[in-house]
Amino acid sequence: MPWLKQLNVIFDDYAKAEIEVARKKYSRFDDGLNGLIWLLSRNAEPVGSFPTSPARDEFMYGFDGDFSAEIPEMWVVYSYDDNDLIVYAINAMDASDAAEPE
């Protein structure tokens, strides 16, 4: 059941390299990453996440970011078990600067 146990977060080497690149490009990357990890470590299958294969052994989740707050859009590929959330890839990109619908 989500929220009852916080998973230990592990970044593989590829994800660590992507994080370093994104930190140089986006001043508020860590703010977005911290929120993303907070959510996934407590609920590894939030609404909007989806498995990347029929075996459901890896998942993808992303969010739009916030252009005005300088938080990039992010997509993450990960897996999890009873104890760990393993992050394999993080793709950070410019958030859309489209105006919010009224």
Image: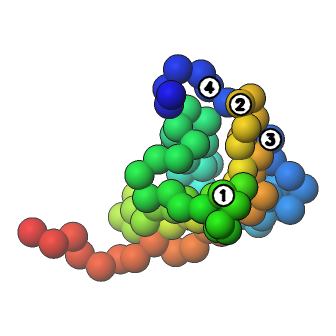
Whole-Å distance between the Cαs marked 2 and 4?
10 Å
- The residue that appears at 57% across and 73% down in the rendered structure is 93
Towards the viewer: 20 or 76: 76
**Percent coordinates x, y for residue 5 in the rendering:** 59, 22
Please tell me whether mark 4 sits on a helix, a strand or a loop.
loop
Q: Quadrant of residue 95?
A: bottom left
Whole-Å distance between the Cαs marked 1 and 4?
20 Å
Up-down relation of residue 57 to residue 18 (above or below)? above
- The residue that appears at 40% across and 76% down in the rendered structure is 96
Identify the disc placed on residue 10.
3
Whole-Å distance between the Cαs marked 2 and 1?
15 Å
Up-down relation of residue 5 to residue 29 (above or below)? above
**Do the residues under discs 2 and 4 have CB atoms within 8 angstroms?**
no
- The residue that appears at 16% across and 72% down in the rendered structure is 101
Left or right for 55, reference 68: right
Observer-side mark, 3 or 2, equals 2
Identify the disc placed on residue 76.
none
